[in-house]
Amino acid sequence: MARYLFHRLWQSALTLVLASIIVFIGVRALPGDPALAMAGEEADPATVAAVRAELGLDESIVVQYLKFMGNAVVGDFGKSIRTGTPVSEMLGATLPVTIQLAIYAMLIALLLGLATGVVAAVFRGRWPEWTANGFSLFALSVPTFWLGILAVLYLSVQLGWFPASGYVSPFEHPLRGVYYLTLPALILGLTHAAVVQRQTRSSMVETLTADFVRTARAKGLGRAAVIFRIGLRNSLIVVTTIVGLQLGGLIAGAVVTERIFSLPGIGKLTLDSVFTRDYPVIQAVVLVITAAYIVINLLVDFLYTVIDPRMRVSGRTS
Amino acid sequence: MRRSRVLVIATAAATLAACVPIQAVTSSGEHTDDFGTPLGDQRVQPGGELVMGLSSEPDRLDPTTSSSLYTRYVMSSICEKLYDLDSRGQVVPQLAGALPTISPDGLTVTIPVRTGIKFADGAPFDAAAVRTSLNRHLTLKTSQRASEIGPIESIEAPGPDTVVIRYKRPFAPITAALADRAGMIMSPAALAAKGDDFGDAPVCVGPFKFVRRIPQTSIEVTRDPLYHDAAKVHLDRIVYRIMQDANSRAANLRSGDVQVADTISPQDVDALAKDKSLRVLQAGSLGYQGVTINTGNVDGAGKPPKPIDTPLARDPRVREAFVLTVDRETLVNTVFNNWFDAACSPIAPQSPYASTASNACQKFDPARSRQLLAEAGVPIPYPVNLQVTNSQDQLRYAQALQASVAEGGFDLRITPVEYSTLLDVQKRGDFELLQLGWSGRIDPDGNMTRFLTTGAAANYGGFSSKELDDLLAQASRVTDVKQRAELYGRAVEVIQRQNPIVYTYRLRNLTVHTRRVAGVEVYSDGVVRLGKAAFVESQEG
Amino acid sequence: MTAVDPVAPVALGRVRGRVLRKLWHNPLGVVGGVLLLIVIVAGVFAPWLAPYPPSQVHFTTPFQQPFTVGFALGTDDLGRDVLSRVLHGTRASLEVGVLSVLLAVVVGVPLGLLAGYWRWLDAVVSRLADVMLAFPFLIVAVGLAAINGGGIGNAAIALGIANIPTMIRVVRAETLRLKESDFVLAAHTMDAGAGRILGGHVLPNALSAIIVQATVIMPSAVLGEAILSFLGLGIQPPDPSLGIMLSDAQQYLFRTVWPGVFPGIAIALICLGFNLFGDALRDALDPKTSHREGR
């Protein structure tokens, strides 16, 4: 077990370093001069060269990388070229927004997905299954960002049920905070709810038709008990993995949602920083997103071994 | 709905001819500037927090290094300038005591400075502080102001209430420059303490003072009790919330989450104007949008121009043909819903330097275009490539432009490029046609010299005309407004003959605020001024 | 990304008839197939079906409602015919989908085979897949758009890259499983080379898993294209794309919603077609479901 843990940790660290190198080189391969981008179209070209020297962009790429990683390890990602704010501060402001959004969306996805998945499995071949399956097909097929736009138009602007956009910290105003995040989280969570629904349904169906369950039923175990104690529990194992993988995807998917709802999250920061060639910010953001994904997967792996002891042996191949 | 059904309905509709007849386009008609009204003696509610939806994130809040226009919006409430504009576009003193006096040889500019004023940190405002700020503009390596304030020899402060600027050559645009960011005076104490990081927590003279900035989210300022005109400041706090999406600014205005928002999309403004609780302010831009034609930028902007062997670069007739097939009116009407204005020169008609000559415009005449192309021996359709930023408005305009120039015999190919890349492309001269705008300066020199004089650093098209160089140089040395207007009029004639830049349209800065607040003002520089705004006593309670 | 059930090894020829029969008897699969057929016909024949060139501007008739004379689905802000643009946009979406599936297959399948076959390569390939998976695909797209200036190819590459790691994993898992199967072991004893075993025995048996994975990638690539174009990173105007139509329509939502409704429906129909057909195909290929009734 310890060996496995160590192995996974080492693998993750390696992945992270590889990713950081790719980002670092990739960012510099982008056309467009950050000094020029910083100065903007209103720039006085004479000063651009001075800006470049000041930003340390004239040093060799190896030196720049080592400096960057050295500082990054202690949480110092440098300063934004554009606004002059420390990047760590920008991450501190935007990351919580995206994490809250992702968690909220995941909760919605789990709630919707598990509920409709169980319904579909229990009422096989009848209308509840068709409805539940129809829901997941719909959610998988419709571009959710488009639903988001329509939702803003109808639910927010015309009906006034939800705020059109904006962010309120749930830590400062718990109720308003949750209220502001509801529509974005719902939109973001929809696709993932569909995935959870399908996994739950198929694993429930498998469990419910398994021989040992039939035996248990024959011995008089109640239907509800079978569904919730055996079926749901087994499904949770599958769903856990999905949740882990999806959470990583959620953070990336948040880019579009954040744009539609003007949420000041890390997705918006990513787009803005790339468009303005804000090197320090791009590097930090990609590194953080990648790290988040890796850490989540690591956690899921460990959680997996806890839920399902069989995985301790074969977990390596997952 | 299934695809097949859509198709069926579609074909059915097409056959059932008179289903819905074609709707005629309704033109919204002329638009006139509305800069807002000063508070006057309206009854106001003291205090309150005003939220403004800001369309773009400001860069550093540092008058010396800032290059984002939106920074000026925030700075206008925390950082007063030596001079300001009034609602008629005239330069008026703000922190200066009066307009500058310029010596007869044009080399010495004397600025009287007000006294008895305190910076937000309590430091006294005086001529020495002005000198420190101007010197910083001049000497800081990352300064964006150096070229705006011209060829300065020295800056002196002979007394606490006088600043004297000595020039190497006469430089008329200085007064206008001091009514923009170059004229913002920073607290010397804060500069000494923060140095290059002044923008992290700027300290100036202003109705409000900086509180905090949450990157990507908001900037907050609070009332400054030390402000010299504090009696006229009513709000407690202003929060600038960054909302880049035009739809969400409009939606938030309607839902009341923000009270003011800038840069409203021409697509949304009609709907907002119908809302009785909202008021639309509009100010025609002093800048322009246009298409730069590469006539000689081979080695990069600022380098000596070299000939480019294409009909468009070589033959002014071909460029004229291109201009004549740009249906400016139809384009702004269609693409911008009639809210923006057609533009034919770098000088806005509301500028004090505008003249009949500078307001002249080439008429849309595609037949003449084809004729000119034939005269120049260019086969029709003549393919030309236009590079444009991938922003919505720019792309839509480019696509409409494509249709318009096709009538005159041009086959316009559009290459959308990401903004940062386009700046690079523009500098390197790696384009045939390039569509990009200029926010504009109060002084027309700022709209022309840097783009059109031979070898100028921002002469992206590599244009070179001795005649134009001389006219512009002469105009920057003369101080009389009428004389300058006449010279600029002649410059425009040269430009319209050679067409190095095809001016296309002029934006309108559209700002909307709820009627619950009053005293919001926007002048021709487009800056939304909130310093003296207030919540009005509500009728409904 | 949906996980794929492992598919048992079966000799292809013998099974084809059974698979087709099962597909035919699955009503949802038939609906999906018909939908796909319509979408593909619309895309392939767009230049002939569309009443106007997709970028033709009609200055005098912007914002026409659907069912207007001459403009069956109305026009957009520049007076362009929405029907023509939807047809051409569908074509572009399919192109991006097919290209990105191809990329994922061409890169992912060999890597998956190799990683499954040789343990020492597994570590390298799996790390590579991890990095690719962890890397937000939007960043890749933004980077590519900045370097190449956007376009169909660009969107396809970004989406293909995003789908390579899952393809690698699926094929690798199949290879690992098939490596231990009797017929591969038998081939080993007959001294067959690695190329022969992978190409002749493993690949054909992994084919159904690859096909199923392809039907998963297709709709996600179509949605991905819409997202990229919506953010201005995919197909670039004036080329028509469903994503661009949506982002255009968002600009003037307060005036009219129609130009945004039809491309949205088109995307949904394309994805629905692939999802339904893909599900049915997976069920049909999976012998375990042979005793179950249709989905």
Image: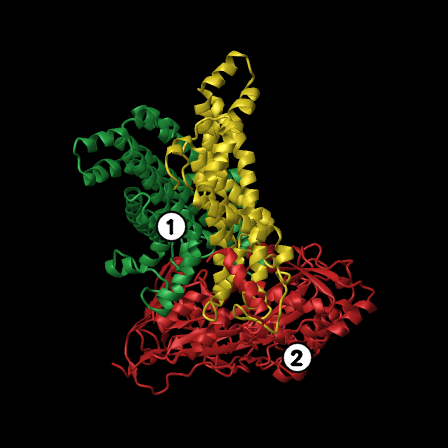
**Amino acid type shown at disc 1:** Gly
The one nearer the camera, B54 or C242, is C242
Coordinates of residue C152 in the picture (x, y in percent)? 58, 49
Of all residues shown, which one is farthest toward the bottom?
B41
Q: Amino acid at mark 2?
A: Ser
Q: Is label 1 or label 2 in front? A: 1
Q: Circle 2 sits on which residue? A: B358
In the rendered structure, the colour chosen for chain C is yellow
The image position of residue A168, as x and y in percent, is: 30, 60
Between B19 and B525, which is closer to the camera in this rendering?
B19
Mark 1, Cα crowd under 10 Å, few <14 / some 14-19 / many 20+, is few
Quarter of the image where the N terminus of chain C is located: top left
Q: CA distance from mark 1 to mark 2?
A: 64 Å
Q: Can residue B234 be seen in the rendering of this structure?
A: yes
> Which chain is in green here?
A
Circle 1 residue: A134
| Image height of C122 relative to B201, above or below | above
Q: What x and y, as percent, mark residue B151?
A: 60, 67
Numbered disc 2: secondary structure? helix
